[in-house]
Amino acid sequence: MHWSERLADKIIEKNPNKETYVCAGGASPSGSIHIGNFRDMAVPYFVAKALKKKGKNVRFIFSLDDFDRLRKVPVNVSNVVDGFEQHIGKAYANVPNPFGTEESSYAEYFENEFMTAVKNLGIDVEFIKQNVKYKNGDYAEKVAYALSKREQIYDILMSFKSQAATEEGKKSYYPIEVYCSECLKDSTVIDSYNDETHELTYHCKACGKQETVNVLSYFNIKLGWKVDWPMRWGVEGVDFEAGGIDHATPGGSYDVSSVIAREIFGIEPPTFQGYGWLGFQGVSSMHSSSGVNITPAGAMKFYTPEVIRWLFAKYDPEDAYNFYFDDTIIRHYSEFDKGLAAYLAGEADEFTTSLFDLCLLDGVKYQNETSFNTISSLAPIVNFNHESLVKAVSAIDLEWTPRADERFEKATYFINTYQPEKIFKLLDAKNVEFADTLQDEEKAVVKKLYDYLYNAETVKDKEVQQFIYNCVNNPNLTKKENIAVQQKYFKIFYNLLFGKDSGPRLYLFFAASNKASYIELLNI
């Protein structure tokens, strides 16, 4: 059973007769939302699909917490605009767009970036902008209610902390953040609050503003995170939500918010699934505020949408795993293709069937595709020329399938960005200096290869591969000794062709390339 189906069963068991189940996720647009945060989207999305598969009505929502405060200026913003730190403390939705694009705010810029990527991944979701909800007054009654329960909320929060609660702390505690009406920052101190009139007096430490407002009509107030979260569970009727493993630890945000949900708002908390962190191998540490960031849109530059969905559906949410920027990308495509072939043939096991039901895009006709490995191997050989690549694939008796163009685009980006060492350029002239260092026996082997290629009407990959090994292998040597001989001669061939000790797979190179471009380099 796939993990999404297991969670769906758990949700149904908890509330078997609910008319519509609500799966939720959320993220703050503190900067470009990176691929690690995408589990906030992927886990509830796959659970929602599993519920639908079981015949249930489902609403899938995703909160953009753009009423949170700007805490730090990301590198990609500070590189563009000087002095942007002046906006720290404002809600993301009240921070200006630093990039000069059509979006009206900082929040909208990064939200649009994320929402476009989600759409391109084929995910159908209802986005909720919390800035809009707060500023429309949708939560005003809940804010007033939380203020009336502030002492009980304080006791709950302190019960999860190591330090002792105090009467002074309780009297001065308010479960809200107030944004100043003048400078829009949360640098405010609440001076007093009247539960009967709902009048709140604050002063701002940043600009000196002091005023009295009514919380039922002043909509620049936000509930603190561990109160806001359970409040929204109740408003939205959430049945399932996922979050980082830190939220799921004993005494973490989910535990605290669950108590507040029950004791303050009188609701049962939703089923919650903590997820493990995504690591990154081959690039620096990433965070949305650091500027070093692989976003969902960035990942789609080298992965097709189906493969990204497959990666997120493949691993159990608790499992931590890495995004790699090396040959693992090629391996992922190969694993995907193997599973897809079994799925299309009706030979996949139960887990693989569920996996591909989740990761394949609706409305797309799938077939076994030209392998990414083949494309990424041949593309550098033909200098990323599309027409030459299609001919090269045909030359090794493979089919250029209808969606291979997309894989070619991904492979081109992947190699040029993460594996430029795989781009080999033929020498403009013979490597005479290197050729002069060869022994007569070594020159004789090169001559054999030259004559074979020169006289071949058509260079076939498997035939030239067999010829090369026949030339360099010695039946009187052990397997280990022959491997050493093979390595020696391939190094010779690469130096004559590219001036390097390594290069592409030669049998593919000879079959895919225009013979006229390389043949004379071997004529020594």
Image (cartoon, rainbow, N blue to C red):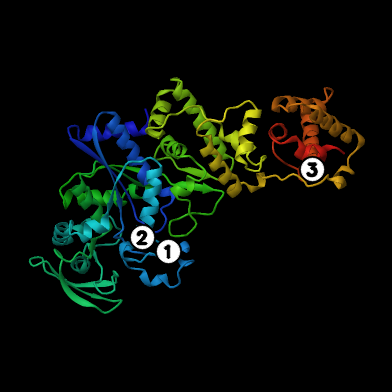
| Residue picked out by circle 1 | 99
Instruction: Measure how far apart labels 2 and 3 are at the Cα level.
Output: 53 Å
Secondary structure under the numbered disc 2 in the rendered image: loop
- At label 3, the amino acid type is Asn
Image spot of residue 399 (x, y percent): 57, 27
Instruction: Measure how far apart labels 1 and 2 are at the Cα level.
Output: 9 Å
| Residue picked out by circle 2 | 103
Quadrant where the image shows the N terminus: top left
Image spot of residue 117 (x, y percent): 41, 47
Lower position in the chain sequence, tag 2 or tag 3: 2
Query: Which mark is on residue 457?
Result: none
- The answer to whether residue 486 is left or right of residue 143 is right
Query: Which mark is on residue 495?
Result: 3
- The answer to whether residue 367 is left or right of residue 197 is right
Asked if marks 1 and 2 touch (Cβ < 8 Å), the reply is yes
Image spot of residue 450 (x, y percent): 83, 32
